[in-house]
Image: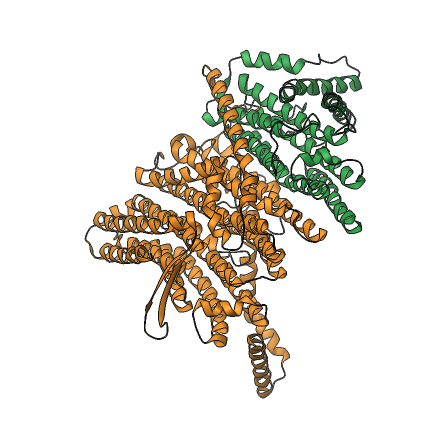
Amino acid sequence: MITPILIASAVLVVGAVLALALPGNRARAAAALASQGVATVLVLSAVVPLLRGGGSIGGSAPWSYPVETISLRVDALSAFFLSWSLPMTFLGTIYAVGYLEPYFARGRNGGPHYALLNITSLAFLIVYSVQNALLFLLGWEIAAVAAWLLVIWDYKSQKIRFAGFNYLVSTHVGLFVLVAAFMLMYAQTGSMDFASFATILAKPSRLRTAAFLLLGVSFALKSAFFPFHTWLPRAHSAAPAHVSALMSGVIHKAGLFAFLRFTLFLEQPEEWMGWGVLTFGALSALFGVLYTSAQRDMKRLLGYSSTENVGIAAMGFGVGYLGMCWHKPTLVALGFGGGLLHLFNHAAFKCLLFYAAGAVYRQTHTVDLERLGGLFRRMPRTGVMFLLGALAISGLPPLNGFVSELVIYSGLLSSAAPSSSGNVALVCAAALLAFVGGVSALSMVRAFGVAFLGQSREPTRSEPHEAPTLMLVPMYAQTVLVVLFGLVPASALAVTRNAAALFGGSSPEVERTLAPLQTATTVLVVVATAIAAVGLWSGRKARRHVTWGCGYTAGNRRMQYTGSSFSAQFASIFAGFLPELRRERLPTEVFPKEHGQIATHHVDAVERRMFEVLGQGEDMVTHASEKIPEQPRFAFAAGLFAILLLVGILVGAAR
Amino acid sequence: MILLHLVALAVLPILVIGAINRTKSLWAGRKGQPLLQLGYDLVRLVRKRAVYSSVTTFLFRLMPYVLLATSLVSGFIVPILGVRAPIAFPLDFVWFAYVWGLGRVALMLGALDTGSSFEGMGASREATFAALLEPALFLVAGAVCLQTGERSFEGVLLLHADSHLVWLGSVVTLFVIVQVESARMPIDDPTTHLELTMVHEVMILDHSGPELAALQAGSAIKLTVGLGLIATLCNPLVGRAAWPVVAAMNAALCLLLAIAVGTVESLIARLKLRAVPQYILVALIAAGAALLATTFRGGAG
């Protein structure tokens, strides 16, 4: 029954209160960890049977106006999201204890931070189980505000406050759109229950189209799809590492959860919706990955890669939509199964990568790739885990990222479309996904190679060493997920089977497709292990010497290839999408007296354009108003007319 | 049949490299090295003691073997002899592309581990070209899927000259893919002596002994797998004769293709690095044409 979920919520609230009330950071951490641990176990005990056997659990209780009844329902879809959201938040809290240690040493109170992490878990329980729009908005808003407060942990820095504010504004723009969608449906049904919304969404109508678009935009903003991603890289580079990890890997998956929740209400989506979701996902994946290729800041890079990965998942959902339109249960299973699996996989490796980046930050006090280097020798465990995460995020076998991408490819290349031009479009989407994979490999090799390999590029104040155990433990746990679900693809698919079945997908075909993958994976691992063992054994007596410098023997650390130079050729091909910001003071005379300076950054094209419009907006309005004749009455009438027109369109859509 | 496939995977690479080098020698008016020279080289390198740069970590030692393993495993999936490969499953070409990707990443990481600017430069070029090339393979694979209705390398065995445009587009694309992936002319000159212009060769500058042997064997196998795939596409006997005949024909075609590669290499200068993306565009266009050709047929039929 639903009882474990309710108890878990209560435990989380008690834990949050204790974290605020108890004296001493140790006791506060213990309260948060204990309550989250208990809640995680309770929730898992409730949802794991749902993942294995399907069905749903639920319950309802009366409440005062305007909600009237609180009805909770956990089906396979909610169970899937809950099954990893809470455990990963728990791991993030463990990491926080280690990561925030230096702040605590300076006397900072960790209570509110721990309480907010508890509240985030609580928000998942609300958002993933309620069946009423008002309660849903409540959970949605709790998650958003908690995330904002978590981001501005270092609130004394103006830059971080700005990043937090940017996030707060963006997320509320999304909220307004969401409220608009809900109001539109409420106006028709007079009820805020999802069940009544379902009656509107079930059949094609203009209202359904309007609601679908509004919901889509709002959820895309939440999950940081292109071009609504501008808040994300800023927030992710400003937040503490575990907050970035949780936001990117777990919290923002709520947007896609909500999208899928409302998809279930569309009995039969229209074909344009499927193509729309697919295109939107593909654009997100493409631009997200292009931006990762030239970033200097490791955490910004990882932030953009979230945009890429939610895009890949959305491509899967688009395929699922098309499968629903064309009545192909296999395609539905491949699309939604692959997309859901990719969300989970992304949570696994993205948290891992952010944790590793946080470990780097703790040791070197920077995440600027151009200042790092040679960390692999200093922090071998972090290095190996970052490498595994990087390979997984590039979709390389035998790790988990490959499995979900293969399932999505399987949908794209199934030649299931009724028309041959549809099939060609799907193949082109597959080719685009391949390009995204290639660029992702470039960015990740660059990030890992520049930061961890070679020699350090700048002298550090103190010698970096391995991260503390409390930070390593969550990384180990995430690494196990990354490796396990890669080596045993069938287990990964089993997790999403029932959730995909909700959409009408049938999976025997999928499992038959993936069964031989196990053989191939085993062969690859066995062959690679055997060859590497023999090879490493035979090279044990090697000598050491300097790196070959073409006869030049005075090379130094600053002469290594940098991150910018690594991506220069690629960035020059896509210069249109990767605007480069240069700050330079070059020496002019033949014998310069001063040192020259040059710094380059690749800025966000969308954000730059947005700020351009905002910055010149006043001029543009002035310019436009100059064209209006000098009669205020006329201008007033024109404005009124425009507003009336807008309202008319909205009302028309509501009909 | 599986045994023959494995033997071919071990022997053909040596012969293919030998054939290419012999062709180049003949064009240059030299007698040339023995056909089995790569085999001798490998044995010699394996017996040598390696020297590692003091900057490197164990990744540097591990990565060449990862490359060798990925090349070998990719050889198990591709029907290089014109008959069913030992491991064949739906979407095996996706697996193949990503296994090659893993090998490429291994090579780049090994290069970056030395902290050498030259090797970083090579890795950057390799990563850029590979990313641009990746869609071409998938477009061609998609075209073959749509044409034959088979979602694996089996499709290659079914595709024949009955669909001229799809076939031609596939062959052209695969040829460019092989040239780029195995660092042959006109993308990269395997015999160049200037580090600044190298792509593949510069990434293995610091490797020596058994690791260098692994890298050389790995690249040779990769080249052979690519040529074997093209040979299967071109082989008129596939599916029409007993399998030993098909296999023999395919091996011969593979060596013929090696001669073609050697000839191209002797007659054409390498492209400027800036022009390489445009050359890759040729592959993309050919692949796109093959894909569009499938709709044309589908629409007509």
Q: Residue at horizontal 58%, vertical 27%? A: B73
> What letter labels the chain drawn in orange?
A
**Quadrant of the frame with the C terminus of chain A:** bottom right
Residue A429: % across, % down: 63, 49
Give the answer, above or below, for where B36 lies relative to A355.
above
The image shows residue B254, relative to residue A476, as above or below, that is above
Residue A326 spot, x, y in % from top left: 63, 56
Is any atom of residue A240 visible in this view?
Answer: no
| Viewer-side residue, B159 vs A298 | B159
Q: Chain B appears in which tint?
A: green
x and y percentages locating residue A524 in the rendered image: 53, 29
**Quarter holding the N terminus of chain A?**
bottom left
* Vertical side of A245 occupied by B205: above or below: above
User: In terms of depth relative to the viewer, which is nearer, B36 or A323?
Assistant: A323
Asked which quadrant contains residue A436, the reply is: top right
Taking depth in this image into account, of B104 and A131 the one nearest to the observer is A131
Instruction: Answer whether residue A341 is visible to the viewer in this image.
Output: yes
Q: Residue at x 36, y 39 (%)?
A: A363
Callout count = 0
